[in-house]
Image (cartoon, helix red, strand yellow):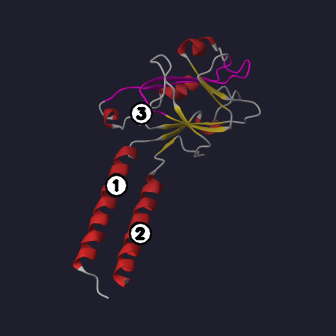
Amino acid sequence: MDCTAAKVASVRNMAVAAALLHLLLMSFTANAAVYKVGDSAGWTTIGNIDYKQWAATKDFRLSDVIVFEYNPQFHNVMQVSHAAYKACNASSPITTHTTGNDSISITRHGHYFFLCGVPGHCQSGQKVDIHVVRSSSSSMAPSPSVSVASSPEHPVASAVSPGPSSAAAAVTPLDPLKGLLTITVAAMLAFLFASRCLM
């Protein structure tokens, strides 16, 4: 049986919708980067890593992902208030991460204060201030779709665990997924077109 004009139009409409969805996804993820805290050293007290200096060389933006890689037998990651960060006080964390491969998505502007809650580690420098500034280019980034209770002093970052284990300091995490999505959409459209034509 031949494909009718209606079937062809239907497939064409699906293709346009899929292409628009793909472009929308690309626009929301184009600027996202993954930052591994401490780069190749990771989250540790060994080697006198200067996490303040590490963070100062980064341009954190909305949708970026901060990855903490560490040995969970010896370390953890706690998001804390500014006062707790300055005092190395881990008694009332906002969130605690303990997997050894924690990925934390940046969902709003401001400071995100993290420290290791193991006694003595913060005092020896195992703490980092992730500062996400407002800029003209980051204002184009999508707003978070989930409301999280927080205050300007200590916004809550959303956690995604376990996370990517990229050794690169900053990579665009979704580039391979964009290509995979394009191939998947094309394959689905080819399947739909072929199956409708065979009916």
Looking at the picture, how far across and down is residue 166, in whole percent?
57, 46
Q: Is residue 122 above or below residue 143?
A: above
Question: Between disc 1 and disc 3, whose residue precedes?
Answer: 1
- Identify the secondary structure beneath mark 3: loop
Characterize the local packing of mark 1: few (<14), some (14-19) or many (20 or more) Cα atoms within 10 angstroms: few
> Looking at the rendering, which quadrant does residue 17 occupy?
bottom left
Q: Is residue 112 above or below residue 103?
A: above
Mark 1 in CB contact with mark 2 (< 8 angstroms): no
Instruction: Look at 46% across and 50% down and name the residue there.
Output: 174
Q: Name the residue under label 1.
A: 21
Residue type, mark 1 in image = Leu
Q: In which quarter of the image is the C terminus?
A: bottom left
Looking at the picture, how far across and down is residue 27, in whole percent?
34, 47
Mark 1 in CB contact with mark 3 (< 8 angstroms): no
Q: Name the residue under label 2.
A: 188
- Identify the secondary structure beneath mark 2: helix
Instruction: Look at 32% across and 88% down and name the residue there.
Output: 1
Looking at the picture, how far across and down is residue 103, in whole percent?
57, 38
Q: Is residue 158 highlighted in magenta? A: no
Residue type, mark 3 in image = Arg
Dominant secondary structure of the residues highlighted in magenta in the image: loop
Q: Distance between the residues labelled 1 and 2?
A: 14 Å
Instruction: Look at 47% across and 29% down and name the residue there.
Output: 57
Characterize the local packing of mark 3: few (<14), some (14-19) or many (20 or more) Cα atoms within 10 angstroms: many
Task: Tell me the number on the disc at residue 62.
Answer: none
Q: Name the residue under label 3.
A: 61
Q: Give the range drawn in magenta.
A: 106-135
Q: Distance between the residues labelled 2 and 3?
A: 34 Å
Looking at the picture, how far across and down is residue 185, in whole percent?
40, 64
Characterize the local packing of mark 2: few (<14), some (14-19) or many (20 or more) Cα atoms within 10 angstroms: some
